[in-house]
Image: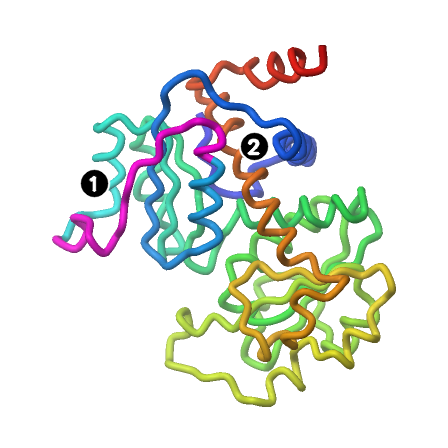
């Protein structure tokens, strides 16, 4: 049975099916008739991801188990594996995990008999964010073929950049990266361009904040960063008429993006957040179906009943 660890494990057909399910949830919804428990184990700060998982689970009728790393037994030395194993023993049907380690899932995936969803792994993967970003682009253009997408910011320390660049390529988009000196990640085999080049060529511009908490040495952002490497109002005017702005958030206004552009007409930043609930509902139910915890025909029967 598959845990949901990486967007790379999905075929294009499976991604499109998740998009379809997410859009269906947006307008209809589904409340599971069986009692199911979900544990969200977040060992890093989170607003959007954790909250959208909780809302997604509650919209599905799941019971959400309380967990806060600062008041958990991990403060007494309990390992991630033993924490997950504890929730499994207590009766959790699903676990979502965010952890600072790039490879935390290697500790647990072969030894846990309930599904695990990756809610963020260090600077390596963020597959549910990836899919909500892809859904937002797909809603706009209905295809990835021929699209030019630029990911700009702290590429070196971003799990979003890692997940999204590969997914965009698999879906047929042309991917470009833009970063200040020292923020490049040359393990990603995509061309680098300047921000001035980026705004002129892109159909979608995905901005990333500087990941200070992942830098090996303490760092600060120079006041000139926005002017040199960010999206200013002057640069926004150079974008194609149909081009959109994306950002996984949290946003550092006035650093990677001028504050006035966060909610401008071409911004889809808050649309991404909304999509996060529905794509996570789709991922949860798809994973539960694969594990046989939820009947594989539940969604199809519900769709048929509503349409009739």
Q: Position of residue 233 (x, y in %)?
A: 74, 78
Return the mark for residue 282: 2
Helix, strand or loop for disc 2: helix
Query: Which label sits in the foreground, 2 or 1?
Result: 2
The reply, left or right, for residue 213 in relation to residue 262 is: left
Q: The C terminus lies in which quarter of the figure? A: top right
Q: Looking at the image, do the residues carrying marks 2 and 1 touch, with CB atoms under 8 Å apart?
A: no
Dot 1 crowding, Cα within 10 Å, few <14, some 14–19, many 20+:
some
Q: Does the magenta stretch include residue 75?
A: yes
Taking 235 as reference, is 149 above or below it? above
* The residue stretch that appears in magenta: 57-76
Residue at 72 percent of width and 50 percent of height: 137
Measured in 3D between alpha carbons, the distance from the residue under mark 2 to the one under mark 1, in whole angstroms, is 28 Å
> Which image quadrant for residue 258?
bottom right
Q: Nearer the viewer, residue 146 or 86?
A: 86
In primary-sequence order, the first of circles 2 and 1 is 1
Return the mark for residue 225: none
Q: Which of 215 and 87 is in front in this view?
A: 87
Q: Position of residue 152 (x, y in %)?
A: 65, 69
Residue at 67 percent of width and 34 percent of height: 23
The reply, left or right, for residue 142 in relation to residue 82 is: right
Q: Position of residue 237 (x, y in %)?
A: 82, 75
Helix, strand or loop for disc 1: helix
Q: How many marks?
A: 2
The reply, left or right, for residue 208 in relation to residue 70 is: right
In the displayed image of the protein, which residue is found farthest to the left? Answer: 76
Return the mark for residue 82: 1
């Amino acid at each position: 049975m598959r845990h949901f660890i990486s967007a790379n494990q999905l075929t294009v057909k499976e991604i499109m099916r998740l998009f379809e399910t997410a859009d269906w949830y947006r307008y209809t919804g589904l409340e599971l008739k069986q009692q199911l428990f979900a544990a969200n184990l977040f060992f890093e700060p989170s607003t959007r991801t954790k909250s959208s998982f909780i809302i997604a689970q509650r919209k599905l009728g799941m019971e959400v188990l309380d967990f806060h790393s600062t008041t958990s037994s991990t403060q007494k030395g309990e390992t991630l594996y033993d924490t997950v194993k504890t929730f499994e023993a207590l009766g959790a049907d699903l676990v979502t995990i965010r952890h600072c380690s790039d490879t935390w899932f290697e500790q647990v995936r072969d030894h846990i008999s309930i599904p695990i969803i990756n809610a963020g792994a260090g600077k390596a993967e963020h597959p549910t964010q990836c899919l909500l970003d892809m859904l937002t682009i797909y809603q706009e253009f209905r295809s990835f073929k021929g699209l030019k997408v630029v990911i700009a910011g702290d590429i070196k320390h971003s799990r979003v950049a890692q997940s999204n660049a590969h997914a965009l390529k698999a879906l047929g988009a042309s991917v470009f990266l833009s970063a200040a000196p020292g923020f490049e990640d040359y393990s990603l085999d995509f061309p680098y361009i300047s921000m001035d080049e980026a705004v002129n060529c892109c159909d979608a511009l995905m901005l990333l904040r500087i990941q200070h908490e992942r830098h090996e040495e303490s760092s600060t952002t120079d006041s000139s960063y926005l002017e040199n490497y960010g999206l200013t109002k002057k640069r926004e005017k150079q974008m194609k008429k149909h081009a959109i702005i994306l950002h996984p958030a949290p946003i550092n206004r006035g650093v990677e993006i001028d504050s006035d552009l966060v909610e401008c007409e071409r911004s889809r930043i808050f649309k991404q957040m909304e999509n996060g609930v529905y794509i996570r509902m789709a991922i949860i139910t798809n994973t539960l179906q694969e594990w046989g915890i939820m009947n594989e025909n539940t969604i199809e029967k519900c769709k048929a009943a509503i349409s009739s």
